[in-house]
Image (tube, coloured by chain):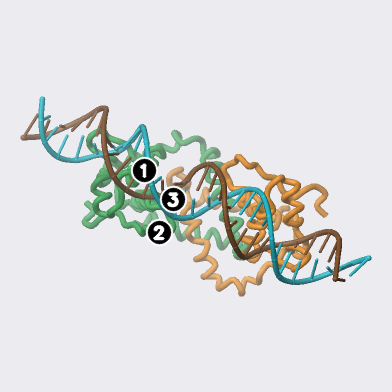
Chain colours: A green, B orange, C brown, D cyan
Amino acid sequence: MAADFLFQVFPNSGLPIYRQLLDQVRRHVVSGRVSEGDFLPSVRQVALELEVNPMTVSKAYSLLERDGVVEHVRGQGMRIAPRPKPSENGSLRERQERLLPLVEQVAAEAYQLHLSSAQVKVLIDRVFKELDGK
Amino acid sequence: MAADFLFQVFPNSGLPIYRQLLDQVRRHVVSGRVSEGDFLPSVRQVALELEVNPMTVSKAYSLLERDGVVEHVRGQGMRIAPRPKPSENGSLRERQERLLPLVEQVAAEAYQLHLSSAQVKVLIDRVFKELDGK
DNA sequence: CCATGTGTATTAGTGTAGTAATACACAGGA
DNA sequence: TCCTGTGTATTACTACACTAATACACATGG
């Protein structure tokens, strides 16, 4: 599948390495670059390629497992997990509540930037279209 | 004006004290609890009331000043700054770009939660209405 | 000019997040 | 069984975030 490598890190970016990896996997998932059932490159493989410690990669993978994005298969590695059905994730209302804090942060920042709710919604559409497109 | 005190901190909440204060000021501003020209309680006043170090309060105030939320008036304290005109904050496009990273984060999380862009936009409306209402 | 009010520069102490080195447990194929 | 491949528990080091104690600069009103 992926011809070139999935990861890239900037050690001096301020953002911790394990978090950079974690975010990149998430993005690869939503963008469809990796799909349910695919295996991520092994901890040591990533560690060698990026010249970081295996434990750092492991930390990213473990957190992804905790969040249900990947699943650990003994002796084989980390596999992209099936996306849970909506019902297993709580009711619509519960899921919206879970997203609320982030949305509040968006609203607060939008206020400072003099952006109306309509203008924010334009952004939402744009970003969602990006994701679906790929 | 404010009959009771503006601030409240939970030292063991995990969130640093200075950030709790900072966020509360921001919320007071967008909610209209404090308005342009109002003075915030002095560093020492807050420090006494909340039993924290004055420097901790000062840190929150300084960051708010850096972000243009308040302005330092020598000998008098921190005053809520006039909200900058949209034009001084960059073009519409620039301001939207500034908000983009947060929106992308929302989209990623919404994906995991099986929330459509329409469902996210409902949330946006709800939160914005909250703010305008006050 | 002194007393009292602002906020803050400087310095230091403490906890913890991030990273790394090592050794281990488990799975699968030769 | 042994070899090699998974991921990880444990431990330790280091940098930095957070907080605090102190002393200072500036403004204002008596």
Q: Which mark is residue A130?
A: 2
- Which mark is first along the chain, 1 or 2? 1
Q: What residue type is labelled 3?
A: Ala
Q: Do labels 2 and 1 share a chain?
A: yes
Q: Which amino acid does label 2 sit on?
A: Glu
Q: What element carries label 1?
A: helix
Q: Callout 3 environment at 10 Å: few (<14), some (14 to 19), or many (20+)?
A: many
Of B92 and B17, which appears nearest the observer?
B17
- Asked if residue C15 is positioned above or below residue B104 in the image, the reply reads above
Q: Do labels 3 and 1 share a chain?
A: no
Q: Where is residue A108 in the image (x, y as percent from the top left)?
A: 61, 56
**Residue for badge 1:** A59
Q: In which quarter of the image is residue B88?
A: bottom right
The residue depicted at 39 percent of the width and 41 percent of the height is A63
Q: Residue A28 carries which label?
A: none
Check if mark 2's residue and mark 3's residue have beta carbons within 8 Å: no
Task: Specify whether residue A83 is in view.
Answer: no
Q: Which chain carries label 3?
A: B
The residue depicted at 34 percent of the width and 57 percent of the height is A9
The residue depicted at 58 percent of the width and 46 percent of the height is B15
Q: Which mark is residue B108?
A: 3
